[in-house]
Image: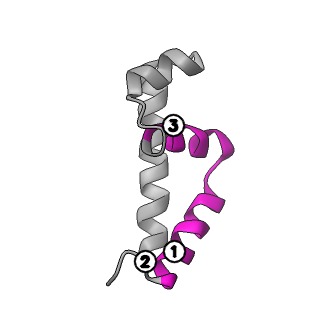
């Protein structure tokens, strides 16, 4: 399937809509802005384990929606 497949795009939008706001923010800092987990933790005043937890949550939600 093409990465521009409309069905995949809709599934991704649904996944983003199901994420808690903070999880989505952290996911976007990593994937769109290209920040490392350490950079995100420092910028957002979080512990590294908290950033990892949000990213794991985001990945799980995306994987579930993309099935």
Q: Nearer the viewer, mark 3 or mark 2?
A: 2
- Mark 3 and mark 2: Cα distance apart in space: 22 Å
Residue 64, image x, y percentages: 45, 67
* Mark 3 touches mark 2? (CB < 8 Å): no
> Which segment did they paint magenta?
6-30
* Mark 1 touches mark 3? (CB < 8 Å): no
Specify few, some or many for label 2: CA neighbours under 10 Å numbering under 14, 14-19, or 20 or more.
few
* Mark 1 touches mark 2? (CB < 8 Å): yes
Residue 53, image x, y percentages: 45, 36
Query: With 23 as the anchor, is 31 left or right in this view?
Result: left
Task: Say the numbered circle drawn on residue 4.
Answer: 2
Residue 18, image x, y percentages: 63, 60
Specify few, some or many for label 1: CA neighbours under 10 Å numbering under 14, 14-19, or 20 or more.
few
Front position in the image: 6 or 51: 6
Residue ID at (41%, 37%): 34
Residue position marked by numbered label 1 in the rendering: 9
Tag 1 secondary structure: helix
Of callouts 1 and 2, which one flags the residue occurring earlier in the amino acid sequence? Answer: 2
Residue position marked by numbered label 3 in the rendering: 29
- Mark 1 and mark 2: Cα distance apart in space: 7 Å
Tag 2 secondary structure: loop
Residue 24, image x, y percentages: 59, 46
Query: With 45 as the anchor, is 37 left or right in this view?
Result: left
Compared to residue 27, the image places residue 65 above or below, namely: below
Determine the image quadrant of residue 45: top right
């Amino acid at each position: 399937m093409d990465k521009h497949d409309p069905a995949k795009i809709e599934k991704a939008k649904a996944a983003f809509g199901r994420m808690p706001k903070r999880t989505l923010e952290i996911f976007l800092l990593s994937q769109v802005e290209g920040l490392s987990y350490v950079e995100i933790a420092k910028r957002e005043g979080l512990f590294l384990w908290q950033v990892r937890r949000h990213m794991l949550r985001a990945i799980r939600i995306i994987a579930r929606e993309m099935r």
